[in-house]
Image: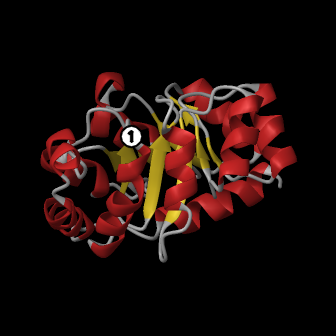
Amino acid sequence: MTPAEQSQKAAEICALAPVVPVLVIEDAAQARPLAEALVAGGLPALEVTLRTPAALDAIRAMAEVPGGVVGAGTLLTPADVRAAKAAGARFGVSPGATDRLIAACEDEGLPLLPGAVTASEIMALLERGYTVQKFFPAEQSGGAAFLKSIGAPIPQVRFCPTGGISLKNARDYLALKTIACVGGSWVAPKEALAAGNWAEVTRLAAEAAALPRG
């Protein structure tokens, strides 16, 4: 799968909803009901970060949820790519991009949303064919104002910004033409997961799914 093909698929996934939940799952038993609650609220694209021992099991469980499109975040190495694909991930997200990581995604046929934060990084990924990129960490790297500025000289690239995004500032990003969607963890608060309050997760997901895009 070429970078251009990966970006085409990433664009399709980003188009599913304005928000992609960024999920840090400590207990794999929470994965399926969490995914069901998010999908019920209108957020079908789900990013499970590979930051916990339960992450791969969570991806396996979420991959079985009807209507869900589960991906793996925090891909750092080719081994991460292979493990994520084997677990059922249908897309990958990385905080940055390296030659080895990109090659692994090409070999495994895993659509990658590669991370970039500077004009040079964005241009380098564009040269390779990535027209949909992750912008991370968004708020710490200039936020919506930066993306508005970079969109003028590099309009070919669309972004999924993550990092510091909440319901309060998501609208600032989604108002921009260069934003495909945003990623955020606020739709799955730890308190709701701990309590098994899936109705609250669905409510937050529905609120996020209703956000307008530019």
Residue 212 drawn above or below residue 139: below
Q: Nearer the viewer, residue 174 or 109?
A: 109
Q: Nearer the viewer, residue 162 or 45?
A: 45
Q: Position of residue 80 (x, y in %)?
A: 68, 33
Left or right of 103, for residue 156: left
Classify the position of the N terminus by image quarter.
bottom right
Q: Nearer the viewer, residue 160 or 199?
A: 199
**Which quadrant of the figure has residue 26?**
top left
Residue 191 drawn above or below residue 7: above
Three-letter amino acid code at the position of disc 1: Ile
Q: Position of residue 136 (x, y in %)?
A: 43, 31
Q: Does dot 1 land on a helix, a strand or a loop?
A: loop
* Mark 1 Cα-neighbour bin, 10 Å: few <14, some 14–19, many ≥20: many
Residue at the spot x=62%, y=54% of the render?
Answer: 89
Left or right of 151, for residue 43: left
Residue 70 drawn above or below residue 165: below
Residue at the spot x=77%, y=43% of the render?
Answer: 105
Classify the position of the C terminus by image quarter.
bottom left
**Which quadrant of the figure has residue 35?**
bottom left
Residue that carries the numbered disc 1 in the rendered image: 25
